[in-house]
Image (cartoon, grey):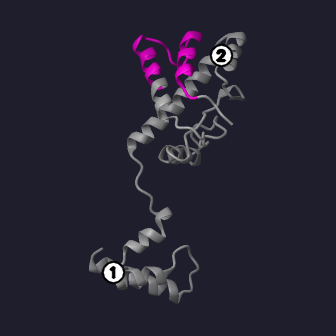
Amino acid sequence: MNTFEKIALLMLCDLHEKNKINGDIDPNIIRSAIVTGNTWAIQNQYSALFPEEVDIDVKNIVSSTLNMYRYISMSLKALPVEDADELIGKHHVVVHERSVQFPGYDGNNEGEYISVAAMFKTLNLFSEQLEIDKNSHQESCEDYENALNELDAIRAEGGDVHKMTKEQIDKLLSAAPRFWD
């Protein structure tokens, strides 16, 4: 932090206190951190307000994964009911209003992926998903990657991902994580 930024922050602290603003940030902590040269304390105290920027590749993976579940839903709807029910039972798929539900990511080890899914929820994207930011309590990224590779293979073979065959859906769901409650 350069001298100008420090002065500007100290002036904002003064305004904050003079106007008796009750906010989430304590101007005394900011002032003390700047005056004593311990600016690391600001990040330490307010780390939840300043998370690391999410890698765009993570955003793209989550988007591709959720789109895959959308394609599976569309394809299941196009199958005869008996075939769709067979696949749903075989793969322990959770369905809500004819949309296959996304099993989620592990909250302990895949938090960045959950945060992207939560942002999609905030933006009202993938609204067919009830718990887009579900904590699966099991690491899932590798399984989603395997399922996405299966989806890419279907595309490479000229398949229509919006209307996959029973066999194609079976391959995808075999590679994808299972839904655990």
- Looking at the image, residue 179 sits to the left or right of residue 160; the answer is right
Q: Nearer the viewer, residue 145 or 64?
A: 145
Number of disc labels: 2
Residue 165 against residue 11 in the figure, above or below? above
Residue 79, compared with residue 95, is above or below; it is above
Magenta segment: 148-177
**SS of the residue under disc 1:** loop
In front of the other: 79 or 36: 36
Kindly indicate the quadrant of the structure image that contains residue 170. Answer: top right
* Residue position for label 1: 37
Residue of label 2:
87
Q: Around disc 2, counting alpha carbons within 10 Å, would you say few (fewer than 14), some (14 to 19), or many (20 or more)?
A: some
Identified at 56% across, 10% down, the residue is 167
Q: Is residue 106 above or below residue 173?
A: below
Which x, y percent locates residue 54?
42, 49
| Amino acid at the residue labelled 2 | Leu
Q: Quadrant of the N terminus?
A: bottom left
Residue at position x 72%, y 13% from top? 81
Q: Would residue 163 be counted in the magenta stretch?
A: yes
